[in-house]
Image: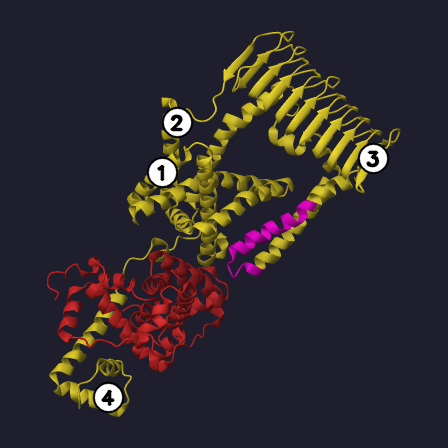
Chain colours: A yellow, B red
């Protein structure tokens, strides 16, 4: 027999040769030294492979000894608590002062949340139907949850459970939002395409208008809610006016408040109480009169009429050419006080350019002007010191996250390696999460869930840079294992990200936005993976 | 060796745990996880090119197992069944990516194999640690890596390997031998860290 080829010897060793063939190989290899050596070395190689592959090497902790599922996830709890603390700080530092300013300027309502959601006419329409809807929603929610839980329990698809939890809320939210006003003793009109309440006619309930063009010449003994392209109020509204429109013109009389989210608001009539407006242009005509306070945020604001109490305005160009009864708190690019301006209280102005005061303007006290500077002050040491502080805060946050939730951290960094999926998921998550959270909040059932979601969202916004930063550091320094290596990468990545964010002319802003989306997406993917893993591993009792 | 199967010889405790886990007993499921997660992770670590892939795959295999436990035939060894599920999952993952696939299906099958020099092969075996072998697996084509893992880690038969990889049974031997050649090549000309102790003495 000729020498055996390697394949034959290999198959012989694996017991894959037929009887006769096997016997031949056996005979030859015991006689031929060369083929015997081949047989021996192939056999050794096989053992070497088995030994190497079957050797028990290290296994990640979560596979080696799974966390006892009854344990409290302290990492998550702490991170959430930290996020809550962060939110509290932001609230204390920004929202509350803002709210106090609102109060100072005579704006009704003590608490911002209450004001936005529950106070005033927003809430009024609900009270009568609240108990029914509350019951209905809770019951439907509970039944659906139970059904879906039972179905998904054993499959462990926690995502399914979460979706199952959100779905009914989403389904019910529109009913709740639209149904509430409908069920309230208010009149709901849909313009076809326009709506006119003719002069001399009276509506004795609240009025809800959805129309292309709405015109109210008559009297409404209640509140008016308008969603319309254009609105003109020439008649008399005894309650409040809420408008979400392109253009709103008030020539008539509103006894209550005006709350407006429109591109243009023009008032030449009388508003009995306060005005809150956010839009592009806000104008109070010469004949216009607001008995209460005026709070506005707009690009251009021209106030020639009379304001009874405080004025709080933020905008690019602010023009005041009429009497203001209370204090004025102004912020903007330009401020112009016309000849008819009459500031009876104090006037404070934070602006890019000093105020122009025309002759004839009356001021009870001099303007307190604070110069604002556009863009970062690269020459100031304070600016750089702040950048370092921001970097340190982000690093500290990342450090805590890494130490408390290393698995989650690793998941997040891993997810950020996939740029496009992360970015896509991030854009969606960033837009959808607050919407869902607010809807959940509004449906009363989920106030706690909604606020918790918003907290996690705020935390994720901040954490986005941590994951992208660690990824970036990893790209530059190469992959590394262990806490120290990851921290090094995090630190370097954050330095670069923060440096890029300082680039002027919007480039920095774009970097910031991309990092936000990207990191958000990575976090969303990591959370999804975490949930799935928990579902696969955890005992149902812990879900 | 721990990963080896014990055909039909499952202990009563395991059989009981499987039965209870099927009924939805979470404690039993946790027990199975504790017992088999390391085994499955090691399988995935060898079959997949990166550690991250292996971690992902392990989680996914367990997520899958939970739903599939009812399909398990209790008369057969549990270990072997686990490997089949894991192998199918990993192979699916790799195929979906199509990394290096062109090389695997085309050239390699027709490329002539160089006859090995037993002395050189013996030296190669002596000079490399188990860890280096596992490290070198990462550089193989997906199919070669998978074949070696199925055979030398999971102890699968030619029939099982053929079924998992979707090839004819007669081709399994060729696949395995070629995989071994590929591995030898990695050591001979591969990354420097795999040749640490060999650099001086080789060739």
Q: Which residues are magenta?
A: A151-174
CA gap, disc 4 and disc 2: 80 Å
Q: Which mark sits nearer the N-terminus, 3 or 4?
A: 4
Image spot of residue A245 (x, y percent): 70, 35
Q: Chain of mark 4?
A: A
Q: Are marks 1 and 3 in contact (CB under 8 Å)?
A: no
CA gap, disc 2 and disc 1: 16 Å
Number of the front mark, 3 or 4: 3
Q: According to the image, label 2 marks what residue?
A: A386
Quadrant hosting residue B1: bottom left
Number of the front mark, 2 or 1: 1
Q: Are marks 3 and 4 on the same chain?
A: yes
Number of the front mark, 2 or 3: 3
In this orientation, does residue A50 appear? no
Q: Which mark sits nearer the N-terminus, 2 or 3?
A: 3
Image spot of residue A51 (x, y percent): 23, 68
In this orientation, does residue A167 appear? yes
| Left or right of B21, for residue B172 | left
Viewport quadrant of the N terminus of chain A: bottom left
Which of the numbered marks, if any, corresponds to residue A496?
A: 1
Number of the front mark, 4 or 2: 2
Q: Are marks 1 and 4 in contact (CB under 8 Å)?
A: no
| Left or right of A286, for residue A310 | left
Q: Which mark sits nearer the N-terminus, 4 or 2?
A: 4
Quadrant hosting residue A38: bottom left
Outermost residue to the bottom? A20
């Amino acid at each position: 027999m000729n020498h055996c080829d390697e394949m034959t010897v290999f198959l012989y060793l694996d017991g894959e040769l037929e009887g006769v063939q096997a016997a031949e190989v056996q005979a030859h290899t015991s006689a031929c030294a060369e083929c015997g050596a081949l047989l021996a070395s192939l056999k050794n190689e096989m053992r070497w492979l088995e030994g190497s592959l079957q050797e028990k090497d290290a296994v990640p902790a979560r596979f080696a000894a799974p966390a006892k599922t009854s344990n409290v996830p302290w990492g998550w709890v702490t991170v959430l608590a930290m996020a809550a603390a962060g939110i509290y700080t932001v609230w204390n530092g920004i929202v509350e002062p803002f709210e106090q300013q609102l109060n100072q300027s005579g704006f009704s309502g003590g608490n911002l949340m209450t004001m936005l959601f529950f106070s005033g006419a927003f809430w009024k329409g609900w009270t009568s139907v609240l108990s029914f809807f509350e019951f209905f929603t809770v019951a439907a929610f509970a039944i659906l949850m139970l059904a879906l839980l039972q179905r998904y329990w054993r499959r462990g698809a926690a995502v399914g459970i979460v979706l199952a939890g959100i779905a009914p809320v989403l389904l019910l939210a529109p009913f709740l939002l639209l149904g509430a006003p409908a069920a309230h003793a208010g009149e709901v009109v849909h313009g076809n395409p326009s709506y006119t309440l003719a002069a001399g006619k009276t509506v004795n309930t609240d009025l809800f208008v959805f129309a292309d063009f709405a015109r109210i010449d008559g009297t409404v003994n209640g509140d008016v809610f308008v969603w319309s392209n254009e609105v003109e109020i020439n008649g008399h509204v005894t309650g409040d006016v809420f408008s979400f429109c392109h253009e709103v013109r008030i020539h008539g009389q509103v006894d209550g408040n005006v709350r407006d989210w429109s591109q243009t608001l023009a008032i030449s009539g009388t508003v009995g109480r306060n005005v809150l407006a956010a839009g592009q242009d806000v104008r109070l005509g010469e004949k216009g009169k607001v008995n209460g306070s005026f709070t506005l945020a707009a690009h251009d604001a021209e106030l020639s009429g009379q304001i009874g109490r405080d004025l709080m305005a933020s905008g690019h160009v602010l023009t005041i050419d009429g009497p203001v009864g209370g204090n004025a708190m102004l912020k903007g690019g330009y401020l112009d006080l016309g000849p008819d301006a009459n500031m009876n209280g104090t006037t404070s102005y934070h602006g890019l350019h000093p105020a122009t005061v025309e002759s004839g303007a009356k001021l009870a006290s001099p303007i307190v002007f604070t110069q604002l500077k556009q863009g970062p002050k690269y020459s100031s040491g304070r600016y750089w010191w702040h950048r370092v502080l921001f970097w340190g805060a982000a690093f500290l946050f990342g450090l805590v996250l890494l130490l408390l939730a290393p698995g989650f951290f690793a998941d997040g960094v891993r997810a950020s390696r996939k740029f496009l999926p992360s970015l896509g998921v991030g854009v969606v998550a960033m837009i959808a999460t607050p919407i869902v959270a607010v809807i959940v909040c509004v449906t009363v059932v989920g106030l706690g869930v909604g606020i918790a979601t918003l907290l996690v969202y705020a935390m994720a916004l901040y954490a986005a840079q941590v994951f992208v930063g660690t990824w970036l550091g990893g790209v530059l320094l190469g992959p590394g294992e262990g806490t120290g290596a990851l921290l090094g990468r995090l630190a370097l990545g954050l330095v670069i990200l923060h440096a890029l964010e300082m680039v002027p002319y919007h480039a920095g802003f774009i970097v910031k936005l991309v990092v936000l989306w990207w990191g958000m997406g990575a976090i969303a993917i990591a959370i999804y993976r975490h949930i799935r893993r928990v579902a696969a591993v955890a005992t149902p009792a812990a879900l | 060796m721990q990963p080896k199967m014990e055909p039909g010889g499952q202990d009563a405790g395991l059989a009981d745990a499987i039965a209870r886990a099927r009924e939805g007993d979470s404690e039993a499921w946790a027990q199975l996880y504790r017992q088999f997660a390391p085994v499955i992770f090691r399988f995935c670590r060898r079959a997949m090119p990166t550690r991250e892939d292996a971690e992902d795959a392990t989680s996914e295999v367990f997520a899958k197992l939970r739903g599939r436990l009812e399909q398990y035939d209790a008369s057969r060894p549990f270990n072997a069944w686990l490997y089949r599920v894991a192998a199918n999952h990993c192979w699916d993952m790799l195929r979906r990516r199509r990394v290096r696939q062109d090389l695997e299906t085309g050239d390699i099958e027709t490329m002539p194999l160089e006859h090995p020099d037993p002395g050189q092969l013996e030296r190669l075996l002596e000079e490399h640690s188990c860890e280096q072998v596992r490290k070198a697996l990462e550089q193989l084509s997906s199919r070669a890596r998978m074949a070696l893992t199925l055979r030398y880690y999971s102890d699968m038969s030619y029939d099982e390997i053929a079924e998992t990889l979707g090839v004819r049974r007669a081709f399994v031997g060729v696949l395995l031998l070629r995989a071994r050649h590929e591995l030898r090549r990695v050591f001979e000309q591969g990354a420097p860290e795999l040749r640490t102790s060999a650099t001086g003495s080789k060739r």
